Image: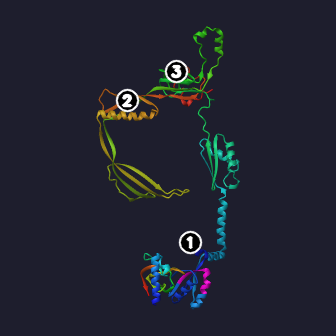
């Protein structure tokens, strides 16, 4: 390997000489330390061999001594390649131009990627970067990543960190947005009920509770108010005369960020019915695929049956067509149709089985409504009986859960009162409109 | 001639005794065969005959004859010859 590379660098020629002189020629060359290789029979009774370029002159001397003549048949190696290149200067220029252009074009930024932003738009960051002198096609040396980071940090609000990295011709702006804590204390927040229920327990961390354990609440009702009314004067303070009473009037209502845990019992209702006798279609596992080609409005079946051999089946069709370009539409389509055989079963259930099935189906439906952290306290399954005996089982399922219903909502000045508010009034859609 | 034989005998015994390789002490060729594809012959004295089915290489006092098909001399250096091709036989001629 190494020797071959060296030979290429030095350059070598392939010479031919008559077979009968070969032995003498080779022996003389090797004793003079000339390296020969690749000795093989050539056409006629001549032998070809390779020799380095710088050994050709001594070989002429040997040839004269052995009285034979050799012909150079091929030249290879770097020196000859350079010679050839010198004659084709346009090629050399083109290659050089290519290398220079590659180098020159790779010193510009061609792609700008902005990653990590969720709320802040890419256009905003790109706009700030544009002002700082970053655009597509800007030379790499004129981009100061540290400076760019600083200016983006300063001019775009809500960023916690900005990292600018140049990777080849790609510049990546990685941003991390600030995640603000959900509450900064500036906003007044009530705890309102998410759904209707019966309060099981209420734990007030801050705020004024408007409901008690055992109260029935409706969705949207304020449970813990942000407004804390002034403390009521206790009985013994009553004696301290009117001065205190006046003070009470002057005491302002205190506003806090309401916090607390409110757990309530909530009931969910579900209903389902199952027929005792039912026809069900099920796949048998047999299927057949038909492949056809549609040219214009003519259909050619390439593979598969002409007629579907099944009595009942489901058909899946997949149409592949060439992409349209401008308004040229190639009217050739490949259509793959898959027929899946179906069989009809008569599903006969006993009343108990049907009841269990209906119960399970209802529970599955109800589970979608019940949040994950809810604790199911009681499940009640009731069969709805009708007067006449029907081949249908109807069930009604009631699930009682214990779950947290408190939800933070901006405070409303008319907030809640102490009675039951209309459930619709506090719904999320219009709950925020009355803010003061 | 008897003197030369005696000298060779002493040399061989000495090399056996000292466990020296024979190709150095006795000026013998070292032949390495790689399958039937290549023969390396070290310590040669030049070639005597070459064509595509026969190569004769002179060694110290003998001639090595390599027979085969499509034989080529891959390289020739002052102390080593490499013959390539489909080798069918290797013989010593004295």
Q: Chain of mark 1?
A: A
Residue B41 visible here:
no
Q: Which residue is mark 3?
A: A211
Earlier residue among tags 1 and 2: 1
Q: Which residues are magenta?
A: A48-60
Q: Chain of mark 2?
A: A
Q: Which residue is mark 1?
A: A2
Q: Are marks 1 and 2 in contact (CB under 8 Å)?
A: no
Earlier residue among tags 2 and 3: 3
Callout 3 secondary element: loop
Residue A152 figure quarter: top right
Q: Are marks 2 and 3 in contact (CB under 8 Å)?
A: no
Residue A348 is covered by the magenta coloring: no
Q: Are marks 3 and 1 in contact (CB under 8 Å)?
A: no
Q: Chain of mark 3?
A: A
Earlier residue among tags 3 and 1: 1
Nearest-to-viewer mark from 2 and 3: 3
Q: Which residue is mark 2?
A: A396
Q: Are marks 3 and 1 on the same chain?
A: yes
Quadrant (top left, top right, bottom left, bottom right) of the C terminus of chain B:
bottom left
Image side of residue A412 versus residue A384, left or right: right
Q: Are marks 2 and 3 on the same chain?
A: yes
């Amino acid at each position: 390997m190494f020797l071959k590379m060296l030979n290429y660098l030095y350059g070598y020629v392939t010479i031919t000489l008559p077979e009968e002189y070969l032995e003498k020629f080779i022996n003389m060359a090797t004793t003079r330390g000339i390296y020969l290789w690749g000795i093989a029979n050539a056409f006629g009774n001549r032998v070809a061999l390779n020799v380095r370029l710088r050994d050709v002159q001594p070989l002429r001397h040997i040839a004269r001594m052995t009285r034979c003549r050799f012909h150079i048949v091929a030249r290879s190696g770097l020196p000859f390649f350079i010679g050839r290149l010198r004659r084709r200067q346009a090629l050399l220029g083109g290659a050089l131009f290519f290398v220079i252009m590659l180098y020159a074009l790779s010193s510009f930024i061609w792609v700008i990627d902005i990653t990590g932003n969720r709320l802040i738009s890419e256009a905003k960051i790109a706009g700030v970067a544009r002002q700082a002198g970053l655009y597509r096609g800007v030379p790499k040396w004129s981009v100061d990543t540290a400076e760019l980071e600083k200016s983006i940090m300063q001019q775009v609000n809500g960023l916690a960190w900005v990292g600018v990295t140049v990777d080849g011709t790609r510049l990546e702006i990685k941003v991390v947005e600030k995640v603000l804590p959900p509450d900064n204390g500036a906003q007044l927040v009530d705890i309102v009920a998410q759904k209707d229920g019966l309060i099981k327990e209420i734990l007030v961390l801050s705020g004024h509770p408007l409901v008690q354990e055992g109260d029935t609440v409706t969705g949207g009702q304020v449970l813990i108010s942000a407004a804390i009314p002034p403390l009521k004067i206790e009985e013994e303070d009553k004696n301290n005369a009117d001065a205190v009473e006046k003070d009470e009037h002057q005491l302002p209502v205190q506003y806090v960020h309401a916090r607390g845990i409110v757990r309530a019992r909530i009931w969910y209702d579900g209903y389902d019915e199952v027929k005792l006798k039912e026809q069900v279609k099920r796949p048998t596992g047999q299927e057949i695929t038909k492949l056809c080609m549609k040219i214009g409005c003519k259909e050619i079946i390439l593979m598969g049956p002409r007629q579907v051999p099944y009595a009942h089946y489901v058909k899946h069709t997949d149409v592949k067509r060439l992409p349209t370009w401008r308004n040229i539409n190639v009217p050739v389509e490949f259509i793959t149709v898959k027929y899946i055989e179906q069989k009809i079963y008569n599903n006969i259930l006993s009343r108990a089985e049907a009841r269990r099935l209906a119960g399970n189906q209802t529970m599955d439906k109800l589970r979608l409504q019940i949040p994950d952290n809810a604790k199911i306290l009681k499940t009640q399954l009731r069969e709805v009986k009708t007067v006449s005996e029907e081949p249908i089982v109807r069930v009604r399922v009631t699930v009682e859960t214990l779950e947290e219903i408190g939800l933070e909502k901006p405070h409303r000045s008319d907030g809640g009162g102490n009675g039951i508010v209309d459930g619709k009034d506090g719904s999320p859609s219009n709950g925020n409109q009355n803010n003061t | 001639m008897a003197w030369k034989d005696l000298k060779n005998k002493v040399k061989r015994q000495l090399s056996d005794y000292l466990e020296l390789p024979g190709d150095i002490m006795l000026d013998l060729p070292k032949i390495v065969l790689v399958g039937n594809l290549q023969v390396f012959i070290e310590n040669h004295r030049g070639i005597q005959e070459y064509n595509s089915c026969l190569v004769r290489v002179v060694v110290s006092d003998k001639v090595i004859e390599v027979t085969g098909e499509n034989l080529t001399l891959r390289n020739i250096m002052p102390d080593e010859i490499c013959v390539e091709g489909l080798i069918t036989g290797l013989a010593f001629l004295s």
